[in-house]
Amino acid sequence: MNYFIKSGDAKHILVIGSETLSRISDPHDRDSMIYSDGAGAVVLSAVESETPVGILSHVTRTDALEHAYLLRMAGSYNPEDKRNVYLKMNGRKLYEYALKTVPAAIKMAIDKSGLPITHIERILIHQANEKMDDAIVNRLYELYGITERPEFSMPMTISWLGNNSVATLPILYDLIVHKEVDNHRLNPGDHFAFASVGAGMHVNAMVYRVPE
């Protein structure tokens, strides 16, 4: 989408992320406790600016060959339910994969943007698991030789909205814009990073500057 806008082929692009994980959550699987339904949408528009704004850089990675089945569809843990299949995950292996790949991808996107890590106001990360997200952001700052990351660097909503997969980032962004997440604001000219990891396995990261 960024390339379409920068090339001039598109002026406005609608991006939608939605999930109804309640349809594929096994009520007998404790991993399903954090899943939720949600949807978010954003319109990206081309603007003229003397300084770069919007998406400054992005990085994508896929490891489907080795890790396609860390998230998979399988039968219920209820032996009496023999008809349906539900979303299952190898939580420990997924955690290890995310901790290995996501911090490096975010760093690559930040370095690609030409900005120092100190100019990144917030890390908006896919709300998959708070413990995992916290470890990812800590590892990111460690890659820059920073042992203590800035306070309020990682806004979280999973404790009250759950993990609604691809909808988590647009929902999180919208809540911050509307000042509904305590201690988190995005002001004109601020830089922040998006990051996600999910089925496949796939990793995405980008650096964004809020237009002034």
Image (spheres, rainbow, N blue to C red):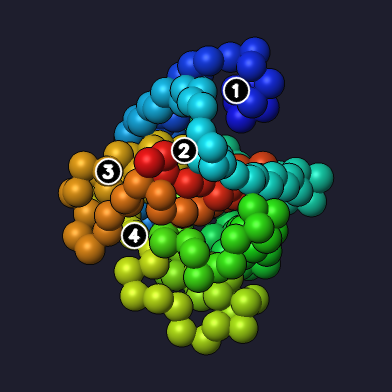
Marked residue nearer the N-terminal end (4 or 3): 4
In the image, residue 58 lies at what x, y percent?
A: 64, 45
- Which residue is disc 3 drawn over? 177
Q: Position of residue 87 (x, y in %)?
A: 50, 41
Marks 3 and 2, the one that precedes in the sequence:
2
Query: What amino acid type should be assigned to the residue bearing mark 4?
Result: Pro
Q: In the displayed structure, does residue 7 sit left or right of residue 167?
A: right
Q: State yes or no: discs 4 and 1 in contact (Cβ < 8 Å).
A: no
| Inter-mark Cα distance, 4 to 2 | 16 Å
**Residue at coordinates 50% horizontally, 19% vertically from top-left?**
13
The residue closer to the viewer here, 196 or 27, is 196
Which numbered circle lies on residue 166? 2
Q: Residue at x 55, y 49 (%)?
A: 207
User: Which residue corresponds to mark 1?
Assistant: 5
Q: Are marks 4 and 3 in contact (CB under 8 Å)?
A: no
Instruction: Compute the Cα span from label 4 to label 3.
Output: 12 Å
